[in-house]
Image (spheres, helix red, strand yellow):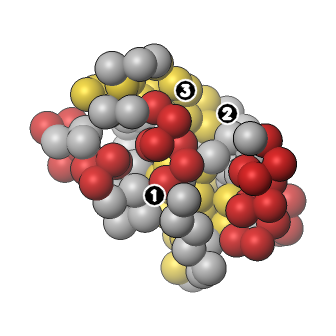
Amino acid sequence: MEVKEDLYYSRNHEWVKTDDDRAYIGITDEAQDQLGDIVFVELPQKGDRFNQSEEIGVVESVKAVSEVYTPVSGTVVDINEELLDSPELLNDQPYESWIISLELTDDSELDNLLSAAEYKSYCEGAQ
């Protein structure tokens, strides 16, 4: 299981990378491993607003359908349209293949997320 040091993590297995007031959100290596081969991704629309922990989309694999939740509140600035044609990128490059980017509403919400070490420990405890 790969865990990147410069990201924030949720207990729902999403990651967040910040760049000023923008947050990029994706699913973790652990999530894609548990899901198996990803075959479909449902994304929100640009301009949609979400509160922390709200569902932002769906990832469908050969094993299951799983909701994706936003670890932080914000407005969708961009979606990764490449995933619509190539959802398997989430398997191949989970930390390079962000799902959406948000304009952060409240960056203090990042304090509620896990560090890389905390996330790794959380995953190890769940097994």
Provide the secondary structure element on which disc 1 rests. Answer: strand
Provide the secondary structure element on which disc 2 rests. Answer: loop
Decide if residue 115 is on the left or right side of residue 47. Answer: right
Position in image of residue 89 (x %, y %): 26, 50
Provide the secondary structure element on which disc 3 rests. Answer: strand
Q: Residue tagged by mark 2? A: 54
Among the 4 quarters of the image, the one containing residue 78 = bottom left
Amino acid type shown at disc 2: Glu
Which one is earlier in the sequence, the residue at label 1 or at label 2? 2
Residue 109 visible in rendering:
no
* Residue at the extreme front: 127
Q: Which of 11 and 110 is in front in this view?
A: 11
Q: Residue tagged by mark 1? A: 101
Q: Decide: is 72 above or below 66.
A: below
Position in image of residue 8 (x %, y %): 67, 67
Residue found at x 41% / y 19%: 63
Q: Residue tagged by mark 3? A: 67
Position in image of residue 19 (x %, y %): 52, 79
Residue 89 visible in rendering:
yes
